[in-house]
């Protein structure tokens, strides 16, 4: 059980680490207030995107327009005119009248008439400016209305961007004094006729309840706000809409009796200025959308919206805008961080799927928040969206770093293309394979076993690393994939895991470049007093099984099949400096090759004979050519006696045979013996001279290349492995016997 948990942890460690980390980062950013402006703009968009609310039939707005002021030829309007307006409105028997005009001192001689109207209108509510701050000063209400407690506050808290998104129901003044807002006063009068009185909510005694409506009190961190001033009893404004949602008449229409006689009956009437010159207008969530008249909403309509909000909540159960507590919002952010991480991790194989999934999920988040808003819940959208995108980016960064580390680590053991294939498609690690056409290159250092016996292990590793580093660079240059280092041998794939049209051509060009690079390798060896190396290469092309082969605990990406075995057989026929290719590879190449020789062999395990070609060069875009091997044999004055043994694979047959060298060249010799030797047979020989000490005489490895037709039992042999001592002995023999 514990092992399974550990396995799951390592498999999902990126998600386990990313989710809480990104959640913490987003919460910290949110607590700084950096996201508040974005969240408020998102709230504005929700107001504009939600379906249009029905028109408010319980409120009538009497506007004092710019045209009305022009007709009256003055502002403020005369007390006489205001008294006449209120009298005409009273005749229609409205439930409540709200006077959204400051009237704290007389304007003309008609003030007495206005006072009489104030005294005789118990459902008339005036206004006062309650809060004093850097942007406004307190303004007293009409004295008579204050005395009769028919006054409401008209202050609204303003957000940092200048918009009104909150309202005040109760103003907490100095000491224990509490003042109601104009809208609450008007709504309370209206609701009294419905038998509804204000009381403490049953769900929360700190909340006001009117009929069906409960008004949750705004707190400083509600919704998208961070440490906002939450003094007095504030609520979030749930706008019904702009001025088009209310029945509207002008001052002139009322004074001239140009309205229906029962327009205001049983309704709330709000009187206020909408003249642009008076600048009694405010930015709202709708301001960015340019309402029908102005980008701002006049103060009287702000009061109308708040009054409508109270009435709709009490009578129609229209929801208030509520928000979660901070712990709930943190869990909300955590959820979307988890979703972003999971989606990105599960789709990590395909960046396009990640992009599509994250885009759809982000859209789902926005739609979810919008539907929640329609139900009366302001759920933050910016922090979870940031968590969603941030966690996806964090997972992508983790994948990129992991891929980079894998590339660095496993690139030393696997080819770059195999590593990239595993990174792009982790399922490629599953056991299994597929048939595909592949060109196999097998190389091997001639006589390396004898070299290994003559040098300490650390020196052998140094020789091998110098050789393999140079070969690896060339193989990578020709886009070959090193499947395995077999001691001093290399197995290279062209066509797996990625297949290209020119796989065979690149394999042959790569082999030629490897042989040409041996001069550089041997130059370094000579400088370091290390032995000269020679390498043989065999190449074959055919259909193989390529894939992950092994067990669940140990597997490797490799190729298997008869064509792989044939490539190894072909390599065994080669001598140092030689590149042999099969008939299959030869037929698969369109470029012109320099063929130095052609012969037929019967490899073990292969049913039919195989034609082999010795490639000396490739033309056109590669333009690589090997120097021709000098086979000019210089005959010796005296025969040099030798003893040799025939090798089968890496083992001798045990029979020590006599023979003689009758000629020498830089790369081989002319061998005379009384035995029939098969062409391409490997032999191990020792020189026999008068001064030779057999136990100390170095082994020299060679391959039988051909039989001289004109002479019986004379063979051309090519040296395939000569230790430094052996090289010195041959040079001395050539000097003494030449």
Image (cartoon, helix red, strand yellow):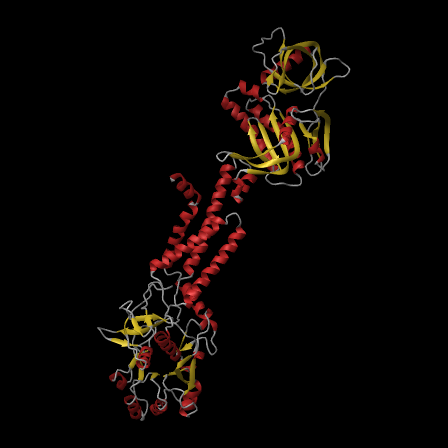
In which image quadrant can residue 386 be found?
bottom left
Quadrant (top left, top right, bottom left, bottom right) of the C terminus: top right
Residue 566 horizontal/vertical position (percent) = 65, 29
The residue at the far top in this view is 690
Q: Quadrant of the N terminus?
A: top left
Q: Where residue 441 appears, x then y in whole percent? A: 63, 31
Extreme residue in the left direction: 175
Please say whether residue 561 is visible from this viewpoint: yes
Q: Position of residue 144 (x, y in %)?
A: 26, 86
Q: Would residue 29 be seen by someone viewing this image from the given angle?
A: no
Residue 185, image quadrant: bottom left
Q: Is residue 506 above or below residue 345?
A: above
Up the image or down, 70 lies above or below 620; here it is below
State the residue at coordinates (61%, 18%). 722
Q: Residue furthest right?
A: 710
Place residue 134 in its image quadrant. Answer: bottom left
Q: Residue at x 63, y 33 (%)?
A: 440
User: In this figure, what is the number of numbered marks?
Assistant: 0
Q: Is residue 469 left or right of residue 342?
A: right
Name above or below for residue 45 compared with residue 551: below
Q: Pick the residue in front: 32 or 87.
A: 87
Q: Nearer the viewer, residue 468 or 734?
A: 468
Q: Residue 619 vs residue 62: left or right? A: right
Give x and y (percent) for residue 115.
29, 90
């Amino acid at each position: 059980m514990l092992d399974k948990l550990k396995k799951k942890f390592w498999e999902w460690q990126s998600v386990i680490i990313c989710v809480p980390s990104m959640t913490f980062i987003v919460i910290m950013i949110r607590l700084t207030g950096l996201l508040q402006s974005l969240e408020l703009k998102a709230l504005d968009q929700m107001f504009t995107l939600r379906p249009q609310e029905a028109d408010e039939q319980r409120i009538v707005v009497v506007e004092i327009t710019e045209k009305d002021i022009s007709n009256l030829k003055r502002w403020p309007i005369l007390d006489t005119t205001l008294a006449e307006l209120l009298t005409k409105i009273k005749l229609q028997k409205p439930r409540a009248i709200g006077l959204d005009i400051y009237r704290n001192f007389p304007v003309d001689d008609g003030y007495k008439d206005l006072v009489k109207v104030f005294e005789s209108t118990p459902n008339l509510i005036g206004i006062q400016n309650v809060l004093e701050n850097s942007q406004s000063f307190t303004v007293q209400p009409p004295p008579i209305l204050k005395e009769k407690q028919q006054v409401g506050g008209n202050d609204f808290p303003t957000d940092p961007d200048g918009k009104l998104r909150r309202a005040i129901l109760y103003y907490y003044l100095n000491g224990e004094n509490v003042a109601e807002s104009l809208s609450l006063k008007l709504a309370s009068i209206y609701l009294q006729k419905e038998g509804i009185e204000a009381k403490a909510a049953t769900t929360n005694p700190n909340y006001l309840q009117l009929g069906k409506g409960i008004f949750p009190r705004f707190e400083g961190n509600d919704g998208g706000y961070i440490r906002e001033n939450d003094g007095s009893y504030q609520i979030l404004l749930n706008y019904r809409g702009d001025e088009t949602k209310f029945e509207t008449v002008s001052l002139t229409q009322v004074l001239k009796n140009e309205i229906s006689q029962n327009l205001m009956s049983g309704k709330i009437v709000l009187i206020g200025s909408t003249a642009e010159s008076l600048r009694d207008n405010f930015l709202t969530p709708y301001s960015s959308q340019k309402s029908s008249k102005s980008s701002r909403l006049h103060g009287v309509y702000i009061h109308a919206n708040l009054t409508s909000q109270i009435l709709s909540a009490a009578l129609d159960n229209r929801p208030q805008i509520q928000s979660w507590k901070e712990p709930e919002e943190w869990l909300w952010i955590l959820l979307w961080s988890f979703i972003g991480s999971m989606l990105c991790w599960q789709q990590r194989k395909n960046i396009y799927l990640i992009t599509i999934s994250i885009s759809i999920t982000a859209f789902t988040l926005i739609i979810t928040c919008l539907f929640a808003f329609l139900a009366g819940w302001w759920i933050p959208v910016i922090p979870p969206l940031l968590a969603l995108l941030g966690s996806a980016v964090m997972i992508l960064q983790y994948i990129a770093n992991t891929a980079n580390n894998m590339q660095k680590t496993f690139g030393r053991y696997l080819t770059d293309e195999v590593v990239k294939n595993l990174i792009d498609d982790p399922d490629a690690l599953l056991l299994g394979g597929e048939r595909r056409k592949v060109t196999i290159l097998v190389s091997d250092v001639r006589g390396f076993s004898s070299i290994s016996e003559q040098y300490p292990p650390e020196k052998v590793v140094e020789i091998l690393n110098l050789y393999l580093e140079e070969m690896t660079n060339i193989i990578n240059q020709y886009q070959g994939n090193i499947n395995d280092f077999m001691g001093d041998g290399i197995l290279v794939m062209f066509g797996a895991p990625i297949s290209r049209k020119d796989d065979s051509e690149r394999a042959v060009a790569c082999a030629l470049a490897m042989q040409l690079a041996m001069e550089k390798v041997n130059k370094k060896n000579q400088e370091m007093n290390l032995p000269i190396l020679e390498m043989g290469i065999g190449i074959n092309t055919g259909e193989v099984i390529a894939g992950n082969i092994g067990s669940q605990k140990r597997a490797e990406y490799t190729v298997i099949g008869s064509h792989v075995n044939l490539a190894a057989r072909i390599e065994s026929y080669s001598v140092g400096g030689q590149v042999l290719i099969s008939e299959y590879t030869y037929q698969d190449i369109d470029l012109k090759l320099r063929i130095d020789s052609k012969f037929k062999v019967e490899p073990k395990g292969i049913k039919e004979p195989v034609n082999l070609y010795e490639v000396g060069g490739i033309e056109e875009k590669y333009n690589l050519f090997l120097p021709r091997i000098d086979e000019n044999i210089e005959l010796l004055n005296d025969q040099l006696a030798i003893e040799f043994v025939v090798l089968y694979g890496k083992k001798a047959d045990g029979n020590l045979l006599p023979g003689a060298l009758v000629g020498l060249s830089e790369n081989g010799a002319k061998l005379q013996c009384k035995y029939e030797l098969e062409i391409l047979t490997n032999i191990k020989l020792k020189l026999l001279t008068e001064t030779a000490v057999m136990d100390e005489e170095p082994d020299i490895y060679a391959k039988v290349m051909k039989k001289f037709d004109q002479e019986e039992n004379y063979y051309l042999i090519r040296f395939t492995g000569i230790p430094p001592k052996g090289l010195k002995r041959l040079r001395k023999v050539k000097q003494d016997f030449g």
